[in-house]
Amino acid sequence: MSALDELDRAFREALARDSDPPTHLALYWHEAVAMKRDAAAPGAQTRGSNALYYMDGTSTEHEVPNVELPVDRLPDKVCQALIQREAASWEGPRSIHFRYERADDGAWSGGYTIETSSQYRELVQGRADLDRRLGAALAALVIGDVERVSLLYGVDGWKDPGPKLKVKRAKPQLVDPDPAIAALWAELVAYMREHGVKHLYYADLTVYDATTVIREGRGIQLLYGR
């Protein structure tokens, strides 16, 4: 049994033991933010959730209790080690997501999915023009006393995941995007789905001035699962 299969089993057993879960969705994720693609000494800087959490839509509830794992086999250690070990290969994992859904009869289903570095590269390169157009539309709103503009989706604590425009000025505003930006957002969501993304959890696209050019990792943060 692989280390990821062991995590999957421990997560499933913990979910089955909880007789009164607060939601019907649980999620854990871990991903690379920087990769060292040296075959002799591969490595990666990673980030992720602290544990398996119950989710209400895109809002975090609380940690799933009684996940029984030894300290050296905790999910962050296992996923980080795997991503780091395979960092030199474009077919190695770039992100790992565990997602479970509870049916009306109380049974949990789900498991883990992996996005390879190659899949991630293809996804990012293929939407470069769309990213540019979204950035330009947001940058056009940075006028007068506006300090920055963000297009946000799935902010933790929001009951309505959005998207919403956050306009930072002396008196910040949180508003619905105008039709042009809403259309670009819909195009982004459609593109992600067409390229294997089943679940979009979070998005932050931020520009600070009218000349900002955003791209993945620089003004664009997306969290999703395949």
Image: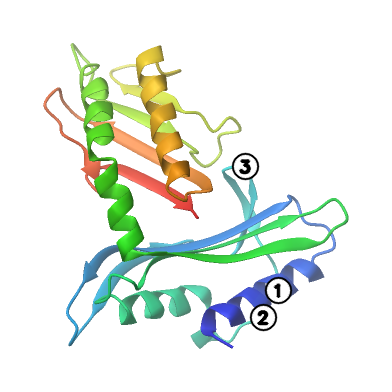
Q: Residue furthest toward the right? A: 105
Q: Residue at x 46, y 79 (%)?
A: 78
Q: Residue furthest toward the left? A: 211
Query: In what element is the residue under mark 1?
Result: loop
Residue 72 image position (x, y, % from top left): 49, 87
Is any part of residue 172 visible from this angle?
Answer: no
Instruction: Estimate how packed mark 2 is, as few (under 14), some (14 to 19) or many (20 or more) residues with alpha carbons within 10 Å.
Output: some
* Above/below status of 105 relative to 210: below
Position of the N terminus, as image quadrant, is bottom right
Type of amino acid under label 3: Gly
Type of amino acid under label 2: Glu
Instruction: Estimate how packed mark 3 is, as few (under 14), some (14 to 19) or many (20 or more) residues with alpha carbons within 10 Å.
Output: some
Disc 2 to disc 1, how far (Cα)?
6 Å
Which-is-in-front pick, marks 1 and 3? 3
For residue 112, what is the image quadrant?
A: bottom right
Residue 117 image position (x, y, % from top left): 32, 64
Query: In what element is the residue under mark 2?
Result: loop
Residue 207's label in the rendered image is none
Query: In what element is the residue under mark 3?
Result: loop
Residue 68's label in the rendered image is 2
For residue 28, what is the image quadrant?
A: bottom right
Pointer 1: what residue? 66
Residue 57's label in the rendered image is 3
Residue 20 lies left or right of residue 123; in this view the side is right
Disc 1 to disc 3, how far (Cα)?
23 Å
* Above/below status of 53 relative to 125: below
Q: Residue at x 75, y 51 (%)?
A: 22
